[in-house]
Image: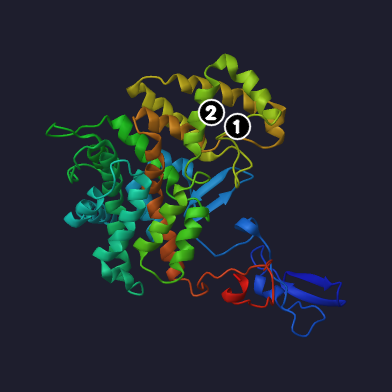
Amino acid sequence: MTDSLTVRDNRTGQEYEVPITDGTIKAADLGQIKGTGEDEPGLAVYDPGFVNTASCRSAVTYIDGDKGILEYRGYPIEQLAEHSNFMEVAYLLIHGSLPSKAEYDAWVHEITFHTFVHENVKSFMEGFRYDAHPMGMLMASVGALSTFYPDARNISDAENRHMQIVRMIAKMPTLGAWSFRHAQGKPFIYPDNDLSYTANFLSMLFKMSEKNFEADERLVRALDVLFILHADHEQNCSTNAVRSVGSSQVDPYSAVSAGVGALFGPLHGGANEAVLRMLRRIGGKENIPAFIEGVKNGNERLMGFGHRVYKNYDPRAKIIKKSAEDVFEVTGTNPLLDIALELEKIALEDEYFVKRKLYPNVDFYSGLIYEAFQFPPEMFTVLFAIGRTPGWLAQWLELVQDKEQKIARPKQIYTGDRTLDFVPASERWA
């Protein structure tokens, strides 16, 4: 027997059989349910924010929010963070499987070879105001790449798609680092192809007059883990933006720039900065009980706890907590970490938060790590975007090969006036 839903329309008394597939019903199947009016449209689903609407079928990332599970292509995030590296995870997301040694070496070589950008991109970025926000610069420069690679519009060619994906992953650290340097009034540093992906990024960020930049391997590894943790996260706001814009069959640079724009918003990419502000406002462990009471009374907001998807401990938060400890071994302890650890301990034991399933998310500790690297808060989302790029591109690649996908065009419920009579300006202004 086929799984189905029987719907009775109480307006007409008519019943409809709606098939259930993979725990979902097709919104179009509700369109057959019409009222008594001959010209009345069929039922549609009203779902602001797509809280309970699936927009695609995807094999990229699996999340079980109730159990705190996150998997890329079936592999648990805990195993990837411990045993893999960002380049291998990027390959996994794009190609759907882990690489052989030969495939991995070829992939890393391709990415490394394409880290440089056209000199005109440098001139373009130098044209921004001295106080331009790094994320605004990143968004604009990513979009500008579409003008340097006009062949990127040929998205039906598999080899061409691969070339653009390689270019985008390779050039994101260069664009992100140059955004950072521009904000500091420092000269742009070219990529060093003798370094790994993440070490090269740190070199472009912090290198000054030294001949060779050498970052502490613990810092390189911590940042690499952060990139892995941010690499994809199902149909979040920025990924939805990439897919929505990509559904028009635009080039991947334009689609990814839409993702960067979505990530720019404080509700998506700015949560870790809000955590730092909260910890500074608390000031010391002795002030935590009063802060907790303020949260319960609605006078304070507990930032970095709770998640739209996770109703359990965010698995990324456990990993990032360990990375924070490794980073502070190199940089020295941040007193805010002591406040964060005590705040987490109290919140996880307090019935008020346990009952509401408010657990730490990935943003609770990531801001502390970024600050330890001496990144200003406006760079936090740039780092997020670099890590998320393989995920955006994997989702875009899946979209353009999905025969079920159509150009994004949601319905609306019109609430404005109707059939007004136009009064010419000569009469309105008389």
What type is the residue that disc 1 sits on?
Leu
Where does residue 290 sit, x and y in percent of width and height?
Answer: 64, 19
Return the residue nearer the eye: 320 or 254. Answer: 254
Locate the C terminus and report the quarter of the image it occupies.
Answer: bottom right
Specify how the rendered protein is coloured.
rainbow
What type is the residue that disc 2 sits on?
Met
Residue under label 2: 278
Q: CA distance from mark 2 to mark 1?
A: 8 Å
Where does residue 352 sit, x and y in percent of width and height?
Answer: 71, 30
Residue under label 1: 302
Where does residue 31 sit, x and y in percent of width and height?
Answer: 70, 76
In percent of the image, x 26 and y 47: which residue is there?
A: 174
In percent of the image, x 41 and y 38: which residue is there?
A: 82
Where does residue 69 sit, x and y in percent of width and height?
Answer: 56, 45
Q: Residue furthest front?
A: 430
Return the residue nearer the eye: 398 or 356. Answer: 356
The reply to whether the C-beta atoms of the residues labelled 2 and 1 are less than 8 Å apart is: yes
